[in-house]
Image: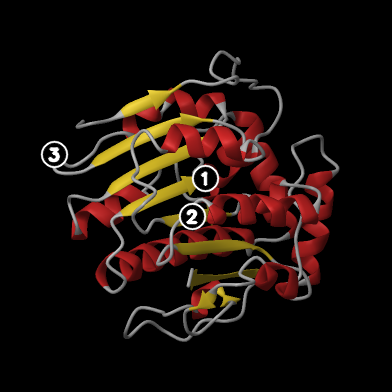
C-alpha cells in the first residue's frame, strides 16, 4: 500500500446494521461477492424472484465501468480518478483496472457506508508508483468530497469523475443534477464524467421489482429516464456512442450481441 490514506468522516463510527438489507451488500451478493449478510441475501433473492435480470444489470454495470476506465487510461490519457459511491470492493475495482495499464494512476474512492469503510484497506492497495485513498463522505457533501480528495489528487490536472449507480440514491433529481455540476465545476478542462444508472421505460418488470424494493424499508433507489440520465452530461462532449444501454457502450471486440437492458450510461469530456 503506497501513498494511501483513509479520511474519516461523520459515518466513520456508525455501526453496521445487519437487520436491514443494504444496497451495497445486495449488489455485492449479486456480483458473487461474500461481503453480505443473510438479510441481504434474502432481499436479493426476493428481488431476483421477481426480476432475475437484475444480476445481468449488476454485472453489465461492472463491465461498463471497466471499459470506461480502460478507455480513459488507454485512449484519453487520464491518470486521476474520483470514484464517488464506490460500494464494496469486488473484482476490477477502479484502481485495479487503471493501474494495470498505468501504474502511476491515482484514485480516490468516496463512500459513507460503515461496511465499506471496514474494507477500506482492501480498496487502498495501490501499485508502488501510484496512490489510492478512501474518503468517508456522503455524496450530498460535495465540498467535503472535493477538499478531502484534493489531498491525493491534483485538481489542476484532468480527472475522471465516476458516478456509478449512485445518483439513483439521491431522491430529488434536481439535487442529483447539482451534485454532478458541483463536482465537475471543480475539475479542469479535459476532465471526464462517467455516469451509469438504472433506467425507466425499458423493462416494466424491473420497475415493478424496484418499486417493491423501495417500499421494503431499504434505502430507496430511484430509476430515471434515459433523457434524465443524458442530462447529467449537459455542457460536456459525449464520447461515442453517447448514452446507451451499458452493454452497448464500446463492447469488447468479439463479444456477442447484447440485448438492451434497463441500465444506461455514458462518458463525456469537459471542454
Locate residue 103 relative to residue 21 in the image: left or right. Answer: left
10 shown above or below 221: above
Could you say where residue 33 lies in the image, as x and y percent from the top left?
44, 42
Q: Write the residue at 48% across / 78% down.
A: 249
Q: Mark 1 and 2 residues: CB-CB less than 8 Å, in contact?
A: yes
Q: Earlier in the sequence, mark 3 or mark 1?
A: 1
The residue tagged 1 is: 84
Disc 2 on helix, strand or loop? Answer: strand
60 shown above or below 202: above
Disc 3 on helix, strand or loop? Answer: loop
Q: Nearer the viewer, residue 269 or 95?
A: 269
Q: Which mark is residue 107?
A: none
Question: Does residue 68 appear anywhere in the picture?
Answer: yes
Q: Mark 3 and 1 residues: CB-CB less than 8 Å, in contact?
A: no
Separation (CA) of disc 3 from disc 1: 23 Å
The residue tagged 3 is: 128
Separation (CA) of disc 1 from disc 2: 6 Å
Amino acid at each position: 500500500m503506497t501513498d494511501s490514506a483513509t479520511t474519516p468522516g461523520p459515518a466513520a463510527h456508525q455501526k453496521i446494521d445487519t437487520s436491514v438489507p443494504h444496497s451495497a451488500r445486495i449488489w455485492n451478493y449479486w456480483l458473487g461477492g461474500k461481503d453480505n449478510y443473510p438479510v441481504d441475501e434474502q432481499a436479493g433473492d426476493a428481488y431476483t424472484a421477481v426480476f432475475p435480470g437484475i444480476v445481468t444489470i449488476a454485472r453489465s454495470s461492472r463491465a461498463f465501468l471497466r471499459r470506461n476506465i480502460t478507455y480513459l487510461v488507454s485512449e484519453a490519457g487520464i491518470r486521476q480518478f474520483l470514484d464517488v459511491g464506490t460500494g464494496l470492493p469486488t473484482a476490477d475495482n477502479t484502481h485495479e483496472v487503471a493501474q494495470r495499464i498505468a501504474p502511476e494512476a491515482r484514485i480516490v474512492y468516496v463512500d459513507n457506508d460503515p461496511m465499506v469503510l471496514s474494507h477500506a484497506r482492501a480498496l487502498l492497495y495501490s501499485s508502488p508508483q501510484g496512490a489510492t485513498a478512501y474518503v468517508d463522505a456522503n455524496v450530498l457533501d460535495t465540498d467535503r468530497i472535493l477538499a478531502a480528495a484534493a489531498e491525493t489528487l491534483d485538481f489542476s490536472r484532468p480527472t475522471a469523475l465516476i458516478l456509478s449507480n449512485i445518483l439513483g440514491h439521491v431522491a430529488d433529481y434536481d439535487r442529483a443534477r447539482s451534485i454532478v455540476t458541483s463536482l465537475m465545476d471543480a475539475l479542469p478542462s479535459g476532465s471526464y464524467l462517467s455516469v451509469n444508472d438504472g433506467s425507466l421505460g425499458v423493462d416494466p418488470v424491473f420497475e415493478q421489482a424496484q418499486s417493491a424494493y423501495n417500499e421494503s424499508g431499504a434505502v430507496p433507489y430511484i430509476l430515471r429516464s434515459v433523457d434524465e440520465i443524458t442530462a447529467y452530461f449537459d455542457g460536456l462532449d459525449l464520447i461515442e456512442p453517447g448514452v446507451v444501454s451499458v452493454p452497448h457502450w464500446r463492447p469488447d471486440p468479439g463479444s456477442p450481441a447484447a440485448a438492451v437492458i434497463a441500465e444506461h450510461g455514458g462518458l463525456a469530456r469537459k471542454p
